[in-house]
């Protein structure tokens, strides 16, 4: 609970890693809350100037609920902080506190921030990726799937996954299904995680996949959620990469193309400039089939060929 003594202490401390002052509530207030949520939590005092002087804010019966609604709708994952109005020197100061969020990174309107010293730092693409990887072990899908056992996983699905990963040439998984899942930390204490259940269960549970695309290195747009089991999305494919600190799985979905064409499209996106002989070798698909799929993608203006006939290759049209 926030009281006058707490406010006085924060005012005396000044802006810091966990404290921010704002004259009024707005976009920058939400950005500060997101920055706090992505690090160790913190408090925004609304109605306070940068020099700790009390400006005060006007609040009505529904003001605080309105602010909460704006914060929730402007953040993803949606955060709901603690909020309380305290009277200081006959003026209202609103304390908005958010704890460190367990699943990172949190964003607002596609922008990601973290708190550094007494200011907000917008994250780069690599920093966003690192936060995702660091958050993996704290996220729901990394925990043991309660009530599930290894017997609930489909060996055929795991073997197909191993084949796809090993065929990519990025790194190699053991041919043993259990050893491969243990390397990826999809099996913990001889039990499947929720991630392995989502991907490999004989009877997959319903789920939500949140996807989007980068407009700039720091802004994600066109984000959406897909709700159902993974098996009902034949046009959804993925790539797996071993990075420093963990495994990065990237989902790719192309509207209106079949599974083979979509896999080809994602492979060209991943390896721009690739030619048909290399595609045939890496995807294990006949040249004639690839030529037909590429014609479809070119007709739809999804890919094009750049360079000389003997040295050029295929690229995704952005």
Image (cartoon, rainbow, N blue to C red):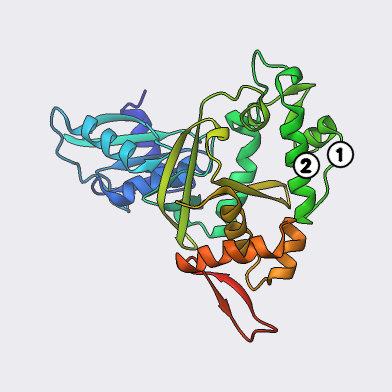
The residue that disc 2 covers is: 162
Badge 1 element: loop
Farthest residue toward the front?
288
**Whole-percent x and y of residue 74?**
33, 43
The residue that disc 1 covers is: 175
In this rendering, the answer to whether 209 lies above or below 167 is above
- Say whether marks 1 and 2 touch (CB < 8 Å): yes
Farthest residue toward the top?
147
> Which residue occupies the foreground of this view, 109 or 80?
109
Q: Residue at x 71, y 33 (%)?
A: 157
Lateral position of residue 221 relative to residue 51, left or right: right
Q: Residue at x 25, y 37 (%)?
A: 67
Residue 275 occupies quadrant: bottom right
Q: Which mark is residue 136?
A: none
**Whole-percent x and y of residue 303?**
52, 68
In this rendering, the answer to whether 295 lies above or below 306 is above
- Give the quarter of the figure containing the N terminus: top left
Badge 2 element: helix
Say if residue 118 shows up in the picture. no
Residue 149 occupies quadrant: top right
**Whole-percent x and y of residue 73?**
31, 39
**Whole-percent x and y of residue 300?**
45, 64
Say if residue 156 shows up in the picture. yes
Q: Residue at x 23, y 47 (%)?
A: 24
> Which residue occupies the foreground of this view, 279 or 103?
279
């Amino acid at each position: 609970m926030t009281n006058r003594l707490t406010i006085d202490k924060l005012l005396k401390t000044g802006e810091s890693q966990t404290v921010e002052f704002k004259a009024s509530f707005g976009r920058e207030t939400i950005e500060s809350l997101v920055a706090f949520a992505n690090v160790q939590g913190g408090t925004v005092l609304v109605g306070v100037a940068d020099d700790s002087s009390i400006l005060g804010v006007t609040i009505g019966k529904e003001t605080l609920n309105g602010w909460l609604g704006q914060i929730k709708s402007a953040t993803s994952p949606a955060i709901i902080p603690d909020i309380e109005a305290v009277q200081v020197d006959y003026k209202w100061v609103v304390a908005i506190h958010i704890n460190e969020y367990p699943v990172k990174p949190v964003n607002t309107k596609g922008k990601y921030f973290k708190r550094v010293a007494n200011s907000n730092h917008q994250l780069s693409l690599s920093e966003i990726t690192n936060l995702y990887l660091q958050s993996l072990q704290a996220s729901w899908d990394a925990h043991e799937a309660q009530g599930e056992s290894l017997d609930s996983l489909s060996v055929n699905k795991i073997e197909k996954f191993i084949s796809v990963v090993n065929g990519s040439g990025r790194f190699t998984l053991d041919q043993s299904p259990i050893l491969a899942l243990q390397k990826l930390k999809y099996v913990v204490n001889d039990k499947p995680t929720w991630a392995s259940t989502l991907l490999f269960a004989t009877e997959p549970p319903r789920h939500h996949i949140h996807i989007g695309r980068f407009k700039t290195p720091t802004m994600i747009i066109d984000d959406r959620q897909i709700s159902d089991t993974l098996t009902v999305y034949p046009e959804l494919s993925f790539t797996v990469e071993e990075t420093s600190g963990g495994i990065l799985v990237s989902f790719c979905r192309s509207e209106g193309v079949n599974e083979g064409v979509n896999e080809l499209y994602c492979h060209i996106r991943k390896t721009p400039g690739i030619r048909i002989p290399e595609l045939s070798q890496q995807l294990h698909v006949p040249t004639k089939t690839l030529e037909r799929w590429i014609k479809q993608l070119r007709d739809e203006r999804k890919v094009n060929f750049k360079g000389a006939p003997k040295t050029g290759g295929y690229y995704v049209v952005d």
